[in-house]
Image (cartoon, helix red, strand yellow):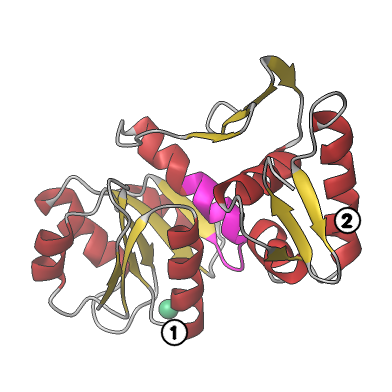
Amino acid sequence: METRTTADAARVLVVEDEPVLRACIADGLTDAGFQVTSLADGTDFAARVDTVRPDVSILDVMLPGTGGFGLAEHLRTHSRSSVVFLTARDSVSDRLAGFEAGADDYLVKPFVMAELVARVRAVLRRSGKLRSTTLQVADLVIDEDAGQVMRAGEPVSVTATELRLLCYLARHRGLVLSKTQILTQVWGYEAYDPNLVEAYVSVLRRKLEKEGTRLIHTVRGIGYRMSDTR
Ligand code: CA
């Protein structure tokens, strides 16, 4: 069991037997500010749930031993955790079985990390467990859940993808992020064209930096850094 801690963050329990995917989910959710505990299977599940006290649990459906539906049953009767299922299967009957097993949401593999983060936030918000979600860099204020962006008190209209990119940059303000890192976290692993990042950054700059100071800085040969100072 591996636990990484961020003070006062929502607690997420991940059960996924595929090690690369498990690490990837844990990294993505930690990056998004959650306190993440990840398990490879449901061994000692009851004890671990008691220790972690998850706000939301992300359960792979197909696991060695007790599967995701069985673990969800335990969570439903012994905890206050919300449940998001991950599965490779996508038939209507599987989805229905998931919701009958107490799913709050259901995500089919392969998925984009930003999509999982958005679903987890939505589930937490619906269950009233989400704490502060506003991101601020200088006079830029982003309400991720409401999808609202304000610069110097003026609303800025952005698309869903632009919002995900903006939130990713803002959450890592002051840090240099490579184009590959940004592609992986905002668009997912199937995306591999760094020009996509450039195109979206230039749109965001047009929308956000019309009159205000520069917020998204180019780091030559690497990627970008969001900051209100040069
Ligand atoms: Ca599995």
Q: Residue furthest front?
A: 230
92 or 176, nearer to the observer: 176
**Residue receiving disc 2:** 198
As drawn, the label of residue 19 is 1
Ligand 1 shows up in which quadrant of the image? bottom left
In the image, what residue occupies the spot 75% across and 23% down?
A: 156
Which of the two marks, 1 or 2, is nearer to us in this view? 2
- What's under tag 2, amino acid-wise? Glu
The spot of residue 183 in percent (x, y) is 73, 64
Q: Quadrant of the N terminus?
A: bottom left
Secondary-structure class at tag 1:
helix
Asked which quadrant contains residue 6, the reply is: bottom left
Q: Residues within 10 Å of mark 2 (few under 14, many from 20)?
A: some
Residue stretch in magenta: 108-119
In the image, what residue occupies the spot 79% across and 31% down?
A: 208
Q: Is residue 44 left or right of residue 23?
A: left
Asked which quadrant contains residue 42, the reply is: bottom left
Secondary-structure class at tag 2:
helix
